[in-house]
Amino acid sequence: MRIIDCFPYFNEKELLELRIKLLYDKVDKFIIIDANKTHKGDFKNFTCKKTLESLGLLSSKVQVIELDLPSYEEEPNAWVRERMQRNVAANFIENDDIFIISDCDEIINPDLIDYYVSIASQYSNNILRIPMAFLNSRADLRVYDSNNQPIPWGAAFLCMKHHLQKYTPSDIRESYAVSTNHIEFPDIFITENNKIEDAGWHFSWMGDSDRLKIKNKSFLHWDEVSVQENYIPKENSTDCLGREDHILKHYSTKNLPTKIWELPRVKQFLLNRHSFFYLDKEKILRGVGQNNFFNWEGHRAFAEWIVRKLNPKTIVDLGVDYGYSSFCFSFPNIGNVYGIDSFEGDNHAGKRDTYEYVLSKKKELELDNLTIIKGYFDDVVKTWDKQIDILHIDGLHTYEAVKNDFETWIRFLNPNGIILMHDTMVDNPDFGVSKFFKEINLPKTNFKNSNGLGIVSYNQNIIDIIKQNFSELIFEFDDQPRNKSVIQVGTNRANDSLSRYLLSKFENLELGVFVEPNCYFNEEIKKCYSKYDNIFIENVAILPEKIEEIVMYYHTGDPTFETASCKLDHILKHQQFYSEGEIKAFSVPCMTLKELFSKYNVNELDWLLLDIEGIDAEIILSFDWENYNIKRVEFEHLHLGEYKDMIEQKFYNLGYKKVNSLHEFDWAFEK
């Protein structure tokens, strides 16, 4: 007697992998039917064999039948194609075979196969149904009806040759699924204490929105239902089709096949970022280091993306500290991650021993692919013998230390691997990351957010792919426009990304006008730009229209005056960030942007930067841009409110294009 697992295939590659690996030792043969048309009747390629080959699952135990189905023009009825694809399997059954017949996303529990086969043999005049947990959108969400009862799913079944000699697989399936009840073999379910026990899992409508839309356009009921736009599955929501009597409730991941945790792609497919599994881990991860990770938090999405993109075998994290970056690299559960640290701290991070803390969080996060190595980088490298696919350098940040770490460990780098260097955007005399990164003569790029992240590879193609996918984060030290005349409105203390850029690039400026209402910052501005001659400071408020004087508000809890504004409501909005202090006011003279340009005889300008706490939109919309040739304009988009889209379109209409800005909260437009 052979046990045959038979199912149609569309594009469910993750479920295909799970099903074969889960049932491989329990069944004698897999019969998979691939078709060249969707149920709707649209053309599609045969993909099953190629997918199996890529997964290393093609064997004599796996038989793929490639079926030519009629097109929509040849046969408008989708049921015909659906039944043809399912029914062809009956041609391959032999006398003593027992068939498990289901859809690809309906998988029997392998632990119950032997038991179910014995029951099917005893009750050969019945159809033995396989009741399954009806999961929808995520593997941790089960479908309940409006009476708060789990909806049963029993479309999958076991049968034998004499069943299929009288009825097709579709006849038998539909006798339950669409309740036509026209077959003579009665259904039976295995019960325990009069309760039908789950014997498998129906992974219905899994995957991201793109996958759901493809399925929606292709499956049997394509013209009857549709996936909800911007659907995010969550507890107590309807299913993705919006059916009011299909309510999603929590389903424990402990009840899922343990094989899922061994298959990273499958786990990601079934348990996406909104799942309870990930949300539990999310709470732990966000608590790591009690806010000590926030300088790296902005790189998490990239870290997980690059791990999935490169599919690395080995990742090395030099500088673990509280563990956040190591955990991020480990989270996709692809390859082995090695976090290396002396756990003594240093002069930059601070002196602290976080070793036990990291081990405890690693255990809570269940990161079995992460190994923590306690030791100095230079000692560990002496016995290191593994090729590295991703190397993250985040130890001591002096120029000499960074250079040593880079040159010591790069010899282990895979030719298609990458090196990441944190804190390339930090302006600190003791930090040498930026300086060394600029000296590296290899394909590279740089992220401006979260203190900067330099990315280096031998492979230019990898760098180009990263740039294409993360263009909004790129700041290349060498490709910014070489401006010679600059006006900055809202200079504050001047020690910012603009000053760092100008001072690193230019020995002289033709013109530098820095507008800051608070005269107490004048000395700091002068000191910052002391190397330049043509520097002018204006202690005025820039307004949309001419007013002689205006009251500026600030909060005494903000010693930097960074949110000083002529709009009281803007200060009130920021008040929540200050634990003590009060709102105060001072008067300053006013000027329009046009008057400022006129005062310095400016008709052409290389760079205009605006940060006018709360009235940026009004200033931008009131200025006559057509009368000036301003090559680059940069401003904080968070203050634009309802005018955001209008202003963006305005600059496009003026012939500007959006480019990378110096600051992650800014927009930059350039001619």
Image (spheres, rainbow, N blue to C red):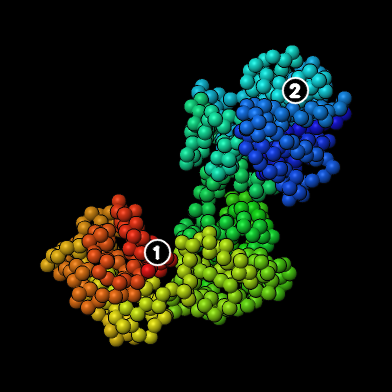
Image coordinates of residue 310 in percent, x first then y, are 64, 59
Circle 2 sits on which residue? Answer: 168
Give the image location of residue 201, x and y in percent. Answer: 66, 33
Q: Residues within 10 Å of mark 2 (few under 14, many from 20)?
A: some
Which amino acid type corresponds to the residue marked 2 in the rendered image? Thr
Q: Is residue 316 left or right of residue 541?
A: right
Residue identifier under label 1: 657
**Quadrant of residue 536 within the rendered picture:** bottom left
Residue, x 84% and y 42% (percent of image)?
A: 60
Three-letter code, disc 1: Lys
Of the 4 image quadrants, the one containing the C terminus is bottom left
- Mark number for residue 16? none
The residue sitting at the left extreme is 548
**From what the image shows, is residue 610 above or below residue 507?**
above
Q: Can residue 328 be seen?
A: yes
Pointer 2 and pointer 1: residues touching (CB < 8 Å)?
Answer: no
Q: Nearer the viewer, residue 314 or 488?
A: 488
Q: Of marks 2 and 1, which one's residue comes earlier in the chain?
A: 2
Count the labels in the image: 2
Left-right relation of 514 to 289: left
118 relative to 540, above or below: above
* Alpha carbon distance from label 2 to label 1: 62 Å
Q: As rendered, which of 5 and 464 lies closer to the eye? A: 464
The spot of residue 131 in percent (x, y) is 67, 26
Name above or below for residue 182 compared with residue 105: above
Residue 357 visible somewhere in the drawing = no
Q: Is residue 531 above or below residue 362?
A: below
- Looking at the rendered structure, the secondary structure element under dot 2 is loop
Q: State the residue at coordinates (67%, 60%).
A: 312
